[in-house]
Image (cartoon, rainbow, N blue to C red):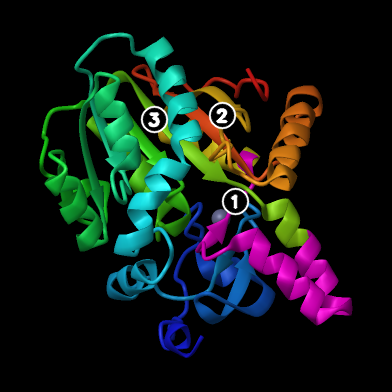
Amino acid sequence: MSAAVSLAPKTRSEICPACGTPAQQARQAWKFVNARGETEWLRCPSCQSYFMDGEYRLENEIAHTQQMTWGDTEHGAQLNQFKQRMYRAILDRIHALVPQQGARLLDVGCAYGGFMTAAKESGFDVTGFDIVPEAVGHVNKSGMKAQCCAHVSEFSLMKEPFDVITVLDANIYWPDQPAELREIHSRLKPGGLLVMRIVDKSWLASIGAALQQVSPAKGEKILRRAVNDHRFSMPVGSFLNLLHKTGFKVISASPRGAVHSDQTSLAVKLSFGLGIALWHTLGLFLAPGAVVIAEKDATHSRGSLREPGA
Ligand SMILES: [Zn+2]
């Protein structure tokens, strides 16, 4: 843990990374030790997200990712195999909406190119970017184009508007989610798709924070499971509102298709099963994650959000 401690942020956050509200308005939520060392977490009064208090420094983020399973050279590529079930489920959904061959797809936070490979094989013209140089090198070596950069605005390998932009398990590391979503919106064709796998265990974080008051060790254990090494934890409902404000029309949002692997543990699969049932019947989000598909609304009309599971 000693190496991780030195990467912990020293300066305070200026904004809630999930919705952009000034961080002075946030209240303290908890303090704990996880893969990033000891960090303090705040809760945003505007979007109800929990977020790590600390300035975003790209060099720290790269160093942190390199020491995580998905960022190191040996295991990063192996994860590509593990996540095939999720890739297939997501590609099936995209193909139903974007049937043409050769459509342009940008994968944000492409890591070792697992989803890019699957998308290319299914007929997309793919590019991607990631902050980890070794991951980008791996993708380039396997014959696909990727760039080492941190923000959609910096991506320069393809200037033309995209048919599809995918963000799979990557937004939770963004320092300013509204800014990234605006940039994604501007780089999509009218009617183009934003496809995201998001994580929402904010409900579990609330349980952990409450439990920490009475049983610190048990509370921390739950908090570590709830936030992993993420920088924020945002309720799905708040996320869908943010998409709407940015000019996206939400086509679907569901835990269905968000299970990573056939080898995912039974406990996690069960919590997805229960989560899917609760979301589609009561609109209650208690699953570990969800797949969200949204369309660039060319008209920018701001109608009401669709029903959960629409
Ligand atoms: Zn917020």
Does any atom of ligand 1 lie closer than 8 Å to the CB of label 1?
Answer: yes
> Residue 148 placed where, x, y %?
18, 56
Label 1: element kind: loop
Marked residue nearer the N-terminal end (2 or 1):
1
Q: Tell us which disc is closer to us: 2 or 3.
A: 2
Asked whether residue 88 is in view, the answer is: yes
Label 2: element kind: loop
Residue drawn at point x = 51 percent, y = 62 percent: 230
Seen in the image, is 297 located left or right of residue 100? right
Residue drawn at point x = 56 percent, y = 64 percent: 51
Q: Quadrant of ligand 1?
A: bottom right
Magenta residue span: 207-236
Task: Return the residue at label 3.
Answer: 194
Q: Which quadrant of the figure contains the C terminus? A: top right
> Residue 47 placed where, x, y %?
61, 51
In the rendered view, would you say 210 is above or below 237?
Answer: below
Residue drawn at point x = 49 percent, y = 76 percent: 36
Count neighbours of disc 2 (C-alpha within 10 A) and say few if under 14, some if 14 to 19, many if 20 or more: many
In the rendered view, would you say 170 is above or below 43?
Answer: above
> Residue 48 placed where, x, y %?
66, 54
Q: Quick one: 176 or 271, which is closer to the camera?
A: 271
Which mark is drawn over residue 234?
A: 1
Task: Return the residue at label 2.
Answer: 257
